[in-house]
Amino acid sequence: MTWARIPKTEIHLHLEGAAPPAFIRTIAAEQGARLDGVFDPAGHYQWRDFSDFLDCYQRATAVLTSPDHFRRLVEAVLRQSAEQGVVYTEIFIAPHVADGHDPGAWIDRLSAMEAGADSVPEVETRFIAIAIRNLGPSSALEAARLAAEHGSPRLTGFGMAGEERYLSVADFAPAFAVAREAG
């Protein structure tokens, strides 16, 4: 039996971070966007350290500008996961970065991501809303409120990502309190 045929769970998957390089290049090409320095000559993402990774991540994912991009991204990530034998996954998603913190944009994006997950039924999918640590506690609180107010049955948790050297975990306690209160 090959490794791909063994059923697996994936419980720590950042949606944009899991974007296949070819997918990002396709979306960039559709928009006429240049991503100089994001890919190495073989077409893989390139970075030197964690700070450089975050810069690469932000530049690559800046081309994801519509709910349909996120639907397609969820589909691409889940199809790749299914090919690797994943049967259950928890995907980290960031509500507060949806089009400048517009709650309507978050609802549209979440609906699109739900549709993307629906299109790959062989992978049971849950979403974990996240706060981006380096955007600060007020942004984290907004992310928690958006997730709490405009969630979905697949939205089952709240976490934190981003630059780990920024602020203390205690600074984000109010955001986690909002998420806890929402269940």
Image (cartoon, rainbow, N blue to C red):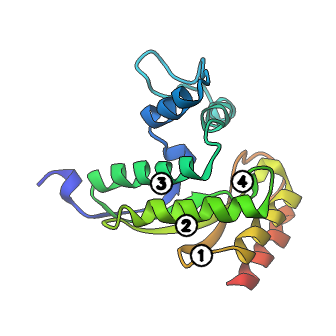
Q: Earlier in the sequence, mark 1 or mark 2?
A: 2
The picture places residue 112, in percent across and down from the top left corner, at 55, 60
Q: Taking 41 as reference, is 51 left or right?
A: right
- Amino acid at the residue labelled 1: Ser
Q: Earlier in the sequence, mark 3 or mark 4?
A: 3
Q: Which residue is mark 2?
A: 127
Residue occupying the point 70% across, 73% down: 150
- Amino acid at the residue labelled 3: Val
Q: Earlier in the sequence, mark 2 or mark 4?
A: 4
Q: Determine which quarter of the picture holds residue 140.
A: bottom right
Distance from Cα at disc 1 to Cα at disc 3:
16 Å
Distance from Cα at disc 3 to Cα at disc 4:
15 Å
Distance from Cα at disc 1 to Cα at disc 2:
9 Å
Q: Which residue is mark 3?
A: 74
Which quarter of the image is occupied by the C terminus? Answer: bottom right
Closer mark to the observer between disc 1 and disc 2: 1
Any part of residue 15 in sight: no
Closer mark to the observer between disc 3 and disc 2: 3
Q: Which residue is mark 1?
A: 152
Distance from Cα at disc 2 to Cα at disc 4:
15 Å
Q: Determine which quarter of the picture holds residue 160.
A: bottom right
- Decide which of 121, 176 is in the foreground and name it: 121
- Amino acid at the residue labelled 4: Ala
Neighbours of disc 3 within 10 Å: few (<14), some (14-19), many (20+): many
Which quarter of the image is occupied by the N terminus? Answer: bottom left
The picture places residue 92, in percent across and down from the top left corner, at 58, 59
Mark carried by residue 98: 4
Neighbours of disc 2 within 10 Å: few (<14), some (14-19), many (20+): many
